[in-house]
Amino acid sequence: MKRRVRQYSLLMGACVLLFAASAPVYFLFGTGWAVAMCVVASVLPPVAMTLGNLADPDDPGDRDARYGSNADPQDHGGEEGPTPH
């Protein structure tokens, strides 16, 4: 769980940093660089969300995956989502 939170936080921090730094870059280097920074920053949130929702295969306590080695053994499939505990 910590790995997922760390990856999500780092990517979202980079996103905020790129958006905030695009204003000074606009005045120093021009419109092209600022727009490029904003484009990169707009791609980061979906990437951060995807990485934040991947289960960690090395963490046995990370059991929110429906399939694979970390799948909850109590979840016998058929219904949407894991069974309540």
Image (spheres, rainbow, N blue to C red):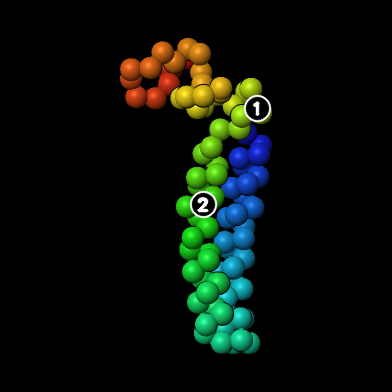
> In this view of the protein, which residue sits in the foreground, 17 or 39?
39
- Which element is circle 2 on? helix
Q: Where is residue 18 in the image (x, y as percent from the top left)?
A: 59, 68
Image vertical order of residue 30 relative to residue 72, above or below: below
Image vertical order of residue 84 relative to residue 29, above or below: above
Nearer the N terminus, badge 1 or badge 2? 2
Q: Residues within 10 Å of mark 2 (few under 14, many from 20)?
A: few
Spatial distance from mark 1 to mark 2, Cα to Cα?
21 Å
- Which element is circle 1 on? loop
Q: Position of residue 12 (x, y in %)?
A: 58, 55
Residue found 52% across the figure and 74% down from its top: 36
Image quadrant where residue 4 sits: top right
Residue found 65% across the figure and 45% down from its top: 6
Say what amino acid the circle numbered 2 marks. Answer: Val
| Residue for badge 1 | 59
Q: Where is residue 48 in the image (x, y as percent from the top left)?
A: 54, 50
> In this view of the protein, which residue sits in the foreground, 68 or 10?
68
Q: Which quadrant of the rendered structure holds the N terminus?
A: top right
Residue found 50% across the figure and 13% down from its top: 73
Q: Position of residue 77 (x, y in %)?
A: 38, 17
> In this view of the protein, which residue sits in the foreground, 65 or 23?
65
Residue found 62% across the figure and 57% down from its top: 13
Question: On the rendered structure, is 40 left or right of 76?
Answer: right
| Residue for badge 2 | 47
- Callout 1 touching callout 2 (CB < 8 Å): no
Residue at the extreme left: 79
Question: On the rendered structure, is 6 left or right of 31?
Answer: right
Say what amino acid the circle numbered 1 marks. Answer: Asp
Number of numbered discs overlaid on the protein picture: 2
